[in-house]
Image (cartoon, helix red, strand yellow):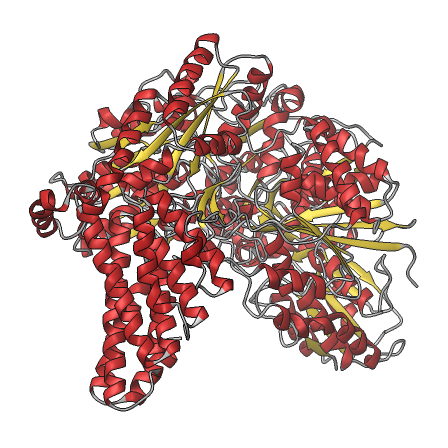
Amino acid sequence: MSDGRLHTILIPAVGGQGGGVLAEWLVDAAVAAGHLAHGTSIPGVAQRTGSTTYYVEIFEGESPPAFSLYPVPGALDVLLAPEFMEVGRAVEQGFPSPERTTIIASTHRLYSIHEKMPTGDARYPAEDLESAARAFSRALIAFDALAVAREHGTEVNAVLLGALAGSQVLPIPAEAYRQAIRAKGVQVDANLRGFEVGTQLATQRPALGAPDGKRPLRSAPGFAGALEPMPAPLRPLVAEALARLVDYQDPAYAQLYLRRLAPFVGPGGDPELVAHVARSLALWMTYEDGIRVADLKTRASRFERIRREARAGDAEIVVTDYLKPDLDELYGVLPHRLVAPLARWAERRWPHGRPTFGQHVKTTTVLGFLRLWLLARLKRWRPVSYRARAEHARMERWLSAVRRCLDRDRALAVEVARAAQLVKGYGEVRRRLTGLVEDLLERVLRADALEAQAGHDAEVATRLAARYRALVLAGPEQEPRAVALAADVVAALERGDRAAALAALGDSA
Amino acid sequence: PGSPAGAGQGPGPRAPAVAILPPLCHNVADRPAPERAPGGSREEPMGERTFAEDVKQLGYGAGQVLRGEGILAITKALLQSGISYVGGYPGAPVSHLLDVLADADEPLLRPLGIYFEQSGSEAAAAALLGASINYPMRGAVTWKSVVGTNVASDALSHVASAGVIGGALVVIGEDYGEGASILQERTHSAALKSSIPLIDPRNSLPSFARFVEEGFGLSEACHEPVFFSIRIRACHMRGQLVCRDNVRPAISMLTPLGAPSFSLDRINLPPATYAMEAQKFERRLPAARRYIVERGLNEHHPGSESRIGLVMQGGLWNTTVRGLHLLGLADLQGRTPVPLLVLNVLHPTVPEELLAFLRGKRQVLVLEEGMPNYLEQELKALAHEARLDVEIHGKDLLSPHGEYVPQLVLRGLTRFLEGAPLEVVSPGEVGERYRRLVGHQEGIRRVLPRPVAKRPPTFCTGCPERPVFSAMKILREREPAVGDTHVAHDIGCSTFSTQAPFNVGHSVLGYGMGLASAGAVAPNFAKRVISVMGDGGFWHNGLNNGVASAVFNQQDSVLVILDNGYAAATGQHHVPSTGTNARRQPTGMTIQEALRGVGVRWIRTVNAYRIPALLGTLREALTTRDEGLKVIVARGECQLERQRRERPRRRQLVAAGRQVVQPRFGVDPDVCTGDHSCMRLNGCPSLTLRPSPDPLRDDPVASVDDTCVGCGVCGEVAHAAVLCPSFYEVRVIHNPSRWRRLLGRMRRAVIARLATA
């Protein structure tokens, strides 16, 4: 009994992305193409960077339809998403359907605060979003519209509008879209540029997935001999590590690294374990003291990168670095002999939050640059510095813990090796996190010893190490839970109540 | 830090960003009022968007076709109804109405003699309707409901009691359900208690226009003010309307009243009040019912499925007929064999109409949002009294609460129809269609095993309110003895601080109620408590019910006022301390003077972007021996508004070849170790994650994206909380002067010799 044909389009956007303009372009284009169209939105607070949606209906036919103000799950023709996690959200709410919906989306991510806050990597898995977009669409056009927009000096929504036109799922000729963009009269040239690029991309159906942005692994000239005995798959990683250590200190320092790594390599060495140790040891040995920071901040490549990222072109730039070392970091770079007494006193005097020395250094001025450059020259005294001693002592404790566990159980050794992932941050943050690593090692070794006495395998210790690390990576709010959990588990084992220990680990999940 | 002198000035070198984009001019102490208006100059219209095109369309005459949002059609209909005055208090979803009228004041309203104001609060707006009590003037006011209606209730009850002789319309933005920003209640009960007719029209621009005009007729017929309720999405729905001419009011600023009109019957005092109550039920509501029937405001669509029927609020018509269409029982135009009763007027209902619809039906479904389900109850009562053999369903098949979105309505309709005595289609087919529609949803968790991360709204990039809450969180974590205290929060953008990453704020009790809601906590709390207020809330309700009351009762606590120059949450609407009113007339009112006026002695004004100053001032306020109320005013212009002004200006200057310094921030990806502490104290949208370029690191590192406006807060936070040395500010100097270029060349030459690759 129905006459005419209805097309429904949902635009799930992040507030501030220009989803409203996109919806208005679409409505105006549809009208320009001679159709009846209506659109609506739920702005309000969501406009302030929350998830917000815009909905458009386009009607081909004579007598006006009863427009719906809401998208209907399963009755959607186009999902036009300027951000990729919002595709996932729309799928979660049941809007797109495999039978009917064409999904046109930008694959770039605007991370939610809940993905940003944890200490570890809490980004929502892109693979899941991609498979959801595939599974819940009859056709999928997805590419990084933000990268495209940046490249062509335009906006994501213009590129997406182009992709929509290019997909030809709607009865609207390209010219009608252009007309709508012109009629709106904002940034017309840039938007038309974006529109054209989007149109082409839609017809080319580009592949998903962005480059991981990793620096290529370096080689380590002069260490060929040392690398020879290593298992082949491991060599690139160790080469990178050696290059890093030479850059950080000197070849001798790299040799020390090799000596520390030796016990884990060689015949019978477990590849997974070695990989973890090699990686974490390299990172730990190149800990970020004042000297390292000054060194990194005074490199030519850094100023090039800053120019590039600021799109400075031929403009002048002035870089101001926000530095605020605390007392530890200051005496940390001085010779141990000299400052040990002072340091011991300071640590008693200020158990938490040592005095800090805030400064704003204009690194692009000669004097500002020199301040950091001279600090970086202290490099040669680093080996005898107070900080060096403390850090290497910690590394040794960690390595010996891994070795000890390796005699007992391979899986346990891997988990203990991975604990070094928690060594992060500066000043107070780093003190807090390294403190947790030490606590983790102590508790896990104790748990293991107790299990060994009781003639059990290392299950509790292994699971404790993994759980502890996971909790710390979830963020500071979870750290007390990790400490408490470890205490409970060890206490349970001391009571000889292994079941309780396992239960604690179970329900702490 | 913390001394008013140190803080009040523009930021020093440590807040570079604000130093360059000069701070909100009213940051600089004691400027004369007119200059204090950030958006105050005439060429800068108030509000989130400018509405030149909309204003033009409001001037359209008979036959011209207006294209725009529902709220614009309503505004046009007001002008077509010959109003003498219009006012209101902004709030989604009806802010647009005031925005457009503010822009239309000079070109359109004044020439018609129509008085326009953005009232100080909904109470003030409701009181405007008093003009229609004694004089045959049509007038309209608007606000966000239900919160606005609550604020307006006192004046509203008085108007409804005295009654009106000129048509009085209240355009209610029913902020209920999906996308709502307030507590969830419906306005229906307010209409019932005050005997105010309630219009809830079906959704299309022509329908909105028609029912605005009928609203005035209804008001004049029954001598009551009338609620015109419109939903969020309906306000923003874009469509078209064939216009009529605007009507010049008989009584206006151009043709003013000469003499007052007095009648004891209109004074809300006994014995008149008893007579008024009687009138409501003996004359006014009956008159309203007659008008509703005569004008056919409610729609009865008969259909061949004569044994069933649907009764619905007018506003639910679109969703309902779309639901019927998807279930194979209607076409796209909404023609359906199922009989419908569409109630565009929810109060008063017309029992005869309802009974006429019920007669001969076996089963009826009522689609009515929220609780109590007044319509369903009334229908059941009527059916019972009339001894009708009809099953009436409603909340048993549909949700008792929440907005009636399609998924809900479809499920309810399917349940209803599957058990209904259908004649044309088979119930089985209905169920089959429904299952086809929702079938795909079973597979969702297979592809998305983890729930998609929530995206709570937060402060915009560069918002001056963020650093205030960064400071409060830093103080809470670093000095819990002082900073970990109760925070009584308020309504406005600032409410976002209750969300991640700050979670600052223990209660939210209403607009301008921050301080008042600390009244009984402060004396019963071992530490000094803090309350927060935006400048919007301060002027709306906070000065009187918060500050004056706290001083009056000698409350010893700390109040933080976020002075960003506007009611920012509603779209940068002017407040008294903006410097100009909605009509761009200078006001010369300041928060500090108002505070002094009600007897606050301890007042500190801090630049919101300077976290050390904020920390110092907060610490001082929380620990000082001075008792009584201590007020900290944190100033910084709404960044949204500032960027709207600055960006184009900057583009022009750069294009014109002038030297322009533009700051932004960055993170050295090799220096950042990816512990994300900065995110937990900041949460700026432009401070985000990127994969570490370091092949040895797996966890992502911090990064500042292109949307950065260079406000400097990330650097200030890293500094104040002693996080890490990764942050840097880069000032890009476009079109550098010759001297700048030379200097740059020399510096680069020296650095190049020393720098390693």
Quarter of the picture holding the N terminus of chain A: bottom right
Q: x, y percentage for residue A234?
A: 47, 62
Q: How many marks?
A: 0
Seen in the picture, residue B416 relative to B142 is either above or below; the reply is below
Is residue A287 in view? Answer: no
Residue toward you, A509 or B104: A509
Say which quarter of the image contains residue A34: top right
Q: x, y percentage for residue B723?
A: 30, 45
Is B617 situated left or right of B294 in this image?
left
Q: Residue furthest front?
A: A225
Residue toward you, A47 or A503: A503
Residue toward you, B155 or A31: A31
Is A395 situated left or right of B657 in this image?
left
Is residue B23 in view? Answer: yes
Residue toward you, A167 or A246: A246
Q: x, y percentage for residue A426?
A: 29, 48
Q: x, y percentage for residue A400?
A: 26, 68
Is A244 situated left or right of B441 in this image?
left
Quarter of the picture holding the C terminus of chain A: bottom left
Is A429 situated left or right of B19 in this image?
left
Say which quarter of the image contains residue B725: top left
Identify the residue at horizontal 76%, vertical 44% (top origin). A201
Identify the residue at horizontal 71%, vertical 30% (top origin). B58
